[in-house]
Image (tube, rainbow, N blue to C red):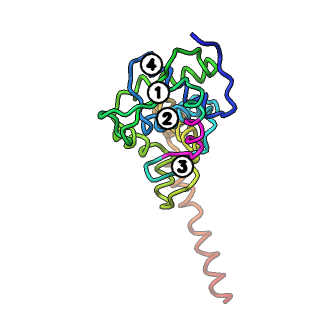
Amino acid sequence: MSGPLESPNPLAGAVLAVLKVARETHIEITKAKLVQLLYLADLDAIESGRTQFSGATWRWDDYGPYDHALVRAEEWVMESELVERRDTRSAEDGSHALSLTVDIEDPLNVADMECVRNVVRLYGGRSATGMKDLSYETAPMVEARAGGERGALLDLNRARRREQVAVLRERFRSRRGAKPPQQDDPGVGDALIAEFLEARDGLRRANAKILDAR
C-alpha cells in the first residue's frame, strides 16, 4: 500500500477516493459514473451539514452535473500511474473505465471518505443512465432545469435548504399531533352575541347621525 498522496489538483484526490472505494467494493467505474458519484458525494456532504469537498464547480452540462476541471484531474491521476484507463464493452461512456493500479491510503479525511463510501456503495452498482436519472432528480438540477439554461451554476446548498425545510415540517407535524385538542371557553359565544345586541341600538343611532350630516 502506498502512502498518502499529495495532489496539486483538488479534484484529483476526490477522483482517487471514488476509485479506491470502487476497488474495495469491486465496482466498475466509468468516466460518466465517476462524475455522477462525485456530484452525489458532494451533495451528501452538504446535506450532512458540511461543505462539499471535491473542489468541483458544478454546472448543468449536456449530461447533467459537470466541471471541465475533471479532465485535468483525470490527466493528473493517469500521469501519476496510479490509475489505468481501459476499454470495456460494458462501459457506457465511450467504452472507458477507470481503476486504480495499486491500493492507496485514503486520500481524503475520515468524514469525506465516509461520504464517498456511502455514495459508492449505494449507487455505484447502477448504470450510467440510472445515475444520470438520479442526479436529475436532485434539488440543484431541478432548479437549473426549471431555469432552462444549460451551463447554469448549480446551487448545491439548495439541497441543504430543502433538507432543513423537511426537518422543520416534520417537527411541526409532530408537535401539532402532540398538542391537546383546542376548545373554546364555555359561554364566550353567548357573551359576544349579548354584547353585540346591547350595542346595536347605539350603533344604529350613530350611523343615522352620520348619514344625516352628509
The residue lying at 55 percent from left, 31 percent from top is 78
Separation (CA) of disc 1 from disc 3 = 64 Å
Between circles 3 and 4, the one closer to the viewer is 4
The residue furthest top is 1
Q: Which residues are magenta?
A: 65-75
Between circles 2 and 4, the one closer to the viewer is 4
**Kind of residue at badge 1:** Val
What label sits on residue 119 in the rendered view?
1
The residue lying at 64 percent from left, 13 percent from top is 3
28 lies left or right of 165: left
Vertical placement of residue 71 versus 105, above or below: below
Separation (CA) of disc 2 from disc 3 = 62 Å
Separation (CA) of disc 3 from disc 4 = 77 Å
Q: Residues within 10 Å of mark 1 (few under 14, many from 20)?
A: many
Q: Label 3: which residue?
A: 191
Q: Could you say where residue 182 lies in the image, as x and y percent from the top left?
A: 48, 36
Q: Label 4: which residue?
A: 23
Which element type, helix, strand or loop, lies under badge 3?
helix
Please say if the residues under marks 1 and 4 sit with CB atoms less than 8 Å apart. Answer: no
Between circles 1 and 4, the one closer to the viewer is 4
Magenta-drawn stretch contains 67: yes
Separation (CA) of disc 1 from disc 2 = 7 Å
Q: Label 2: which residue?
A: 40
